[in-house]
């Protein structure tokens, strides 16, 4: 699974490593040093989550004497996980699906020039990456539409993602135009063509954008803080911050809660790594 | 316009109609509000529904820039934003470059390390922040023990503002170094193998190979990373929220805007919603991003022309 991240590590260092053996040794030392920095906080989290509170107070870094899984049950209950997780999943899935469908129908005609001013429209999407944050007028808008503290309004905020459009357009441009011509010749309509030909052909790009967008929604903290005041609507991020406010000193339970929240992300990351990496570094080198 | 294949007359409208929903939401949720920020910066808008909104001209800007203690605090926040940006960009850029070269070798288990370094990127500010709050637990946490062993006592995130600030910077770098690294790796993999082989035949030292082959050919990745890091760190503030909350002596502009416009939601205390003022602060931040981003862009373009011709 790890091999997916970059299938072919370059061989160019072979020369160096054959000549100077310590090059390899230094490399491993650097790798290990950073592995400690990156793994250490996670291991600390795991170890703390399995301790009792008195154990933790006595010695924060010692390994747990007995494995105390009670923390997980406590955290699950106290942090209101079932509710918040359900909310997060609902927000993430619904917004990602709606966004993706609309984005394909924005990206495709822009890539093909099937609408007037396609170049200008695309520029409008790129510009947004540099403009001031939309936060304040957006809030005023939602307020006047009566969508404040409303789960539908909250989902609406995530129906937009200019980077995703740019990634899709770049991918659509690589699909041969002969496809369109042949399909049209066979009497296939525009909607059917995009839905049954373009969509399946673009699976890699669509997966990339989907993962990118979904991770953003899943991790979002600011927007729920601003827009959702009813506890029943909280996503898991907001719930965690509130939980931390209340149980801030009870680190074993808090650590268990953080781990419960981290695990799904780690699993998704390991399974979809390729798409995540390409999404986050998309267009980076070719510009 | 390219020739459209899917019919004429009414059928010609299909792409327009299907494009409309996505574009409509884009205008409504993002582009419109983004442009309207400048309009709101001249008003006394609050976050209260139905409250009157009055035109106040340049008052918000005057207050932000020239009014006593408040404006001195703002300048402090502005300065801190620049420090944060400079520190995060230089360190993250350098580490990302070094790690990409290290990780791009054929070594046993290399994919594991690469994956590990990239992992925090997807966790998001809440998890990143909470993980580090625990790691920096002042009463005998791992970092406290480590520093204690060399005789340093620290309160970490609860200590001096400047110290807390530095730790947020460290966590920010820890969290995002993986992206920088991955972009460099993508760049490294575009460099043709033959160049390295030619250098090897010429008997070039590893450093001179890096200096004369890798570094110049990495220019596109360098540009991307610098711009992304600079713009990203000028606007970043979520880790401040999770790690230390709204605390005097640590705020950056992004957090200041949020606190003014939506109340200081640390704990249950909510201060007034001064959205007009917050919008003015957003425009100040935007100008900062624009000026710095543009000058760096110009510098990078010239550099690229010099190197790649």
Image (cartoon, rainbow, N blue to C red):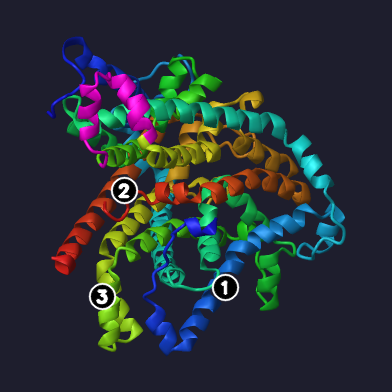
| Mark nearer the viewer, 2 or 3 | 3
Q: CA distance from mark 1 to mark 3?
A: 31 Å
Q: Chain of mark 3?
A: B
Residue A53: image x %, image y %? 83, 53
Residue B294: image x %, image y %? 23, 51
Name the residue beneath numbered marker 2: B289
Name the residue beneath numbered marker 3: B195
Q: Earlier in the sequence, mark 2 or mark 3?
A: 3
Q: Chain of mark 1?
A: A
Locate residue A79 relative to residue B25 in the image: left or right.
Answer: right
Q: Residue at x 77, y 46 (%)?
A: A253
> Does the magenta portion include A180?
yes
Name the residue beneath numbered marker 1: A33
**Residue that extends furthest to the front in the rendered view of this protein:** A186
Q: Chain of mark 2?
A: B
Q: Quadrant of residue B283?
A: top left
Q: CA distance from mark 2 to mark 3?
A: 38 Å
């Amino acid at each position: 699974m790890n091999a997916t991240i970059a299938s072919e590590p370059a061989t160019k260092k072979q020369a160096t490593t054959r000549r100077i053996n310590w090059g390899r040794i230094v490399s491993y030392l650097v790798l290990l040093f950073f592995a400690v920095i990156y793994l250490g906080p996670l291991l600390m989290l795991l170890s703390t989550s399995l301790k009792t509170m008195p154990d933790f107070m006595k010695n924060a870094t010692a390994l747990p004497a007995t494995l105390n899984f009670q923390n997980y049950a406590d955290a699950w209950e106290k942090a209101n996980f079932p509710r918040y997780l359900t909310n997060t999943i609902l927000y993430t899935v619904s917004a990602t699906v709606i966004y993706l469908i609309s984005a394909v129908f924005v990206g495709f005609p822009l890539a093909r020039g099937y609408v007037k001013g396609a170049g200008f429209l695309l520029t409008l999407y790129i510009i947004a990456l540099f403009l001031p944050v939309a936060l304040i007028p957006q809030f005023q808008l939602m307020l006047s539409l009566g969508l404040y503290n409303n789960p539908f309004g909250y989902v609406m905020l995530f129906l937009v993602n200019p980077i995703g459009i740019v990634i899709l357009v770049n991918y659509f441009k690589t699909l041969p135009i002969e496809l369109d011509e042949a399909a049209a010749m066979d009497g296939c309509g525009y909607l059917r063509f995009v839905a049954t030909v373009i969509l399946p052909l673009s699976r890699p790009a669509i997966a990339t954008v989907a993962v990118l967008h979904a991770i953003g929604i899943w991790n979002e903290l600011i927007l729920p803080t601003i827009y959702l005041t009813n506890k029943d609507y909280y996503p898991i991020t907001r719930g965690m911050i509130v939980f931390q406010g209340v149980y801030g000193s009870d680190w074993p339970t808090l650590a268990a809660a953080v781990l419960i929240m981290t695990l799904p992300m780690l699993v998704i990351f390991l399974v979809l790594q390729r798409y995540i990496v390409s999404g986050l570094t998309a267009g980076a080198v070719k510009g | 316009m390219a020739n459209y294949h899917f019919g004429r007359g009414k059928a010609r409208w299909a792409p327009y109609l299907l494009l409309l929903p996505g574009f409509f939401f884009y205008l409504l949720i993002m582009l419109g509000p983004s442009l309207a920020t400048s309009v709101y910066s001249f008003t006394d808008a609050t976050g209260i529904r139905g409250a009157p909104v009055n035109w106040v001209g340049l008052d918000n800007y005057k207050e932000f820039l020239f009014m006593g203690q408040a404006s001195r605090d703002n300048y402090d926040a502005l300065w801190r934003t620049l420090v944060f940006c400079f520190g995060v960009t230089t360190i993250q850029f350098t580490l990302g470059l070094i790690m990409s070269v290290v990780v791009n070798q054929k070594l046993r288990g290399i994919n594991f390390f690469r994956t590990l370094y990239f992992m925090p990127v997807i966790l998001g500010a809440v998890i990143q922040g909470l993980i580090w709050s625990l790691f920096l637990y002042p009463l005998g946490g791992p970092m406290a023990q480590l520093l204690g062993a060399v005789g340093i006592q620290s309160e970490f995130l609860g200590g001096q503002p400047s110290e807390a600030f530095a730790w947020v910077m460290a966590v920010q770098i820890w969290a995002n170094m993986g992206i920088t690294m991955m972009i460099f790796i993508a760049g490294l993999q575009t460099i043709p193998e033959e160049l390295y082989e030619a250098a090897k035949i010429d008997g070039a030292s590893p450093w001179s190979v890096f200096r004369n082959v890798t570094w110049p050919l990495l220019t596109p990745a360098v540009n991307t990373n610098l711009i992304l890091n600079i713009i990203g760190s000028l606007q970043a503030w979520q880790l401040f929220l999770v790690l230390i909350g709204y605390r005097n002596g640590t705020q950056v502009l992004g957090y200041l805007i949020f606190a003014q416009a939506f109340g200081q939601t640390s704990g249950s205390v909510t201060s007034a919603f001064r959205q007009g003022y917050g919008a003015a602060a957003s425009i100040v931040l935007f100008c900062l991003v624009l000026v710095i981003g543009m000058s760096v862009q110009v510098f990078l373009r010239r550099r690229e022309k010099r190197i790649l011709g």
